[in-house]
Image (tube, rainbow, N blue to C red):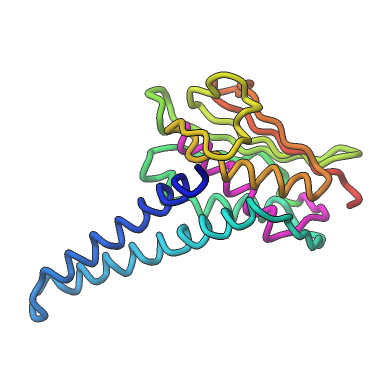
């Protein structure tokens, strides 16, 4: 069910905060390890609270229509921000992330909502790539033609088992792809932009390939 998936997703980041809190609580106030443990707790909160908030917001969005407010923005900036946001995540998993995009790629899109799509696709790609024994890597490419902006995220993971179209159903429980809710929301956001999102096993690196098309001219 939706709820058990959400609980499962929140449990992981919450667990690391709780563990760090216990470690502080076990120390005497005058302990010399206390500052270091408090610093650790602070880091756990900083990293995990936004994640918990995002899971809650995403869940709510799964049940309602997405409101889009477009502005003219540089997609390359959105991609670079997503890479910065997932840097610790990819570093911890030894996944290299490369970009293939012009430094300026302006389009009309909802900055906040579409950033969530890019973050989701990148995070999924990193998680999938980390599962492989070969060179774990993710490539995010963006380009523009007369009609569309194209965004492609490819990973070196094992790809989709079964039909890739099923990736957009909420709470597929394969370990690699998380709950699937992130992809379901991404699809809603892309479609609210009158765009298309496709999942396939056509990655140059042997894993999954996610392709987003956003029409130009709003």
Q: Which residues are magenta?
A: 105-128
Q: Position of residue 26 (x, y in %)?
A: 11, 68
Q: Position of residue 133 (x, y in %)?
A: 37, 23
How many marks on residues?
A: 0
Judged left or right of residue 4, residue 194 is right
Judged left or right of residue 7, residue 218 is right
Residue ID at (45%, 33%):
176
Magenta region's main secondary structure?
helix
Judged left or right of residue 30, residue 122 is right
Q: Nearer the viewer, residue 9 or 205?
A: 9
The image quadrant of residue 93 is top left
The image quadrant of residue 21 is bottom left
In the rendered image, the vertical position of residue 35 relative to residue 202, given as above or below: below
Q: Position of residue 162 (x, y in %)?
A: 57, 19
Residue ID at (60%, 31%):
167
Q: Position of residue 53 (x, y in %)?
A: 50, 62
Residue ID at (69%, 42%):
187
119 falls in the magenta region: yes
Residue ID at (42%, 51%):
7
In the rendered image, the vertical position of residue 169 relative to residue 72, given as above or below: above
In the rendered image, the vertical position of residue 214 relative to residue 167, given as above or below: below
Residue found farthest to the front:
1
145 falls in the magenta region: no
Judged left or right of residue 133, residue 139 is right
């Amino acid at each position: 069910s939706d709820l058990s998936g959400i609980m499962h997703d929140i449990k992981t980041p919450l667990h690391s905060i709780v563990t760090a809190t216990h470690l502080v609580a076990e120390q005497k106030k005058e302990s010399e390890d206390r500052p270091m443990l408090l610093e650790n707790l602070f880091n756990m909160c900083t990293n995990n609270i936004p994640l918990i908030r995002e899971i809650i917001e995403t869940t709510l969005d799964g049940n309602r229509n997405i409101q889009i407010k477009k502005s003219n923005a540089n997609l390359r900036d959105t991609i670079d921000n997503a890479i910065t946001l997932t840097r610790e995540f990819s570093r911890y998993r030894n996944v290299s992330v490369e970009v293939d995009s012009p430094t300026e790629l302006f389009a009309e899109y909802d900055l906040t909502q579409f950033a969530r799509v890019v973050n989701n696709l990148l995070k999924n790609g990193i998680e999938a790539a980390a599962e492989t024994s070969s060179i774990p890597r993710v490539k995010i490419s963006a380009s523009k033609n007369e009609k569309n902006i194209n965004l492609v995220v490819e990973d070196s993971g094992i790809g989709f088992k079964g039909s890739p179209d099923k990736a957009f159903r909420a709470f597929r429980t394969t370990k690699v792809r998380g709950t699937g809710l992130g992809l379901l929301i991404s699809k809603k956001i892309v479609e609210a932009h009158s765009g298309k999102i496709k999942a396939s096993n056509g990655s140059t690196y042997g894993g999954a390939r996610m392709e987003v098309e956003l029409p130009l001219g709003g």
